Amino acid sequence: MEEQSLDRQALLAAVGLADWAVSTAGSVLAGMRRLLRRSDGPELVQEAQQELVARGRIALDRVAPAAPAHLEVLAQHVVARRAASAGDV
């Protein structure tokens, strides 16, 4: 009996999730239609794209190991050259 109850709860949760996804998609599409009617639509799309790229960078920085900063790499090269030239004298 408990197994049926868990199955029913899982089914209800899945149906609820699907209903939420459909209603959210409908809201998103309505919002997109409103945006397309605006005269500044292309600028809004460009800003949204830039924001998504920035968010993507932030998300990757959180999970991916960070590469050394460009200036840090240059500074390490300078230190290595100075050390090499000091050894030549």
Image (cartoon, rainbow, N blue to C red):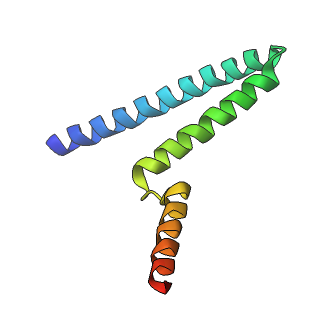
Taking the spot 52% from the left edge, 74% from the top edge, the residue there is 81
Taking the spot 45% from the left edge, 56% from the top edge, the residue there is 66
Q: Closest to the observer: 45 or 1?
A: 45
> Vertically, is 48 above or below 53?
above
> Vertically, is 64 above or below 62?
below
Q: Closest to the observer: 33 or 46?
A: 46
Residue reaching furthest to the left: 2
| Residue 36 shown left or right of residue 83 in the figure | right
| Residue 49 shown left or right of residue 61 in the figure | right
Q: From the image, which quarter does the N terminus lie in?
A: top left
Q: Position of residue 47 (x, y in %)?
A: 69, 28
The reply to whether residue 34 is in sight is: yes
Taking the spot 35% from the left edge, 34% from the top edge, the residue there is 13
Q: Closest to the observer: 15 or 41?
A: 41
The reply to whether residue 1 is in sight is: no
Residue reaching furthest to the front: 89
Taking the spot 15% from the left edge, 41% from the top edge, the residue there is 2
Q: Position of residue 74 (x, y in %)?
A: 55, 62
> Vertically, is 17 above or below 71?
above
Number of numbered callouts drawn? 0
Q: Position of residue 15 (x, y in %)?
A: 42, 33
Residue reaching furthest to the right: 39
Image quadrant where residue 87 sits: bottom left
Q: Position of residue 31 (x, y in %)?
A: 67, 18
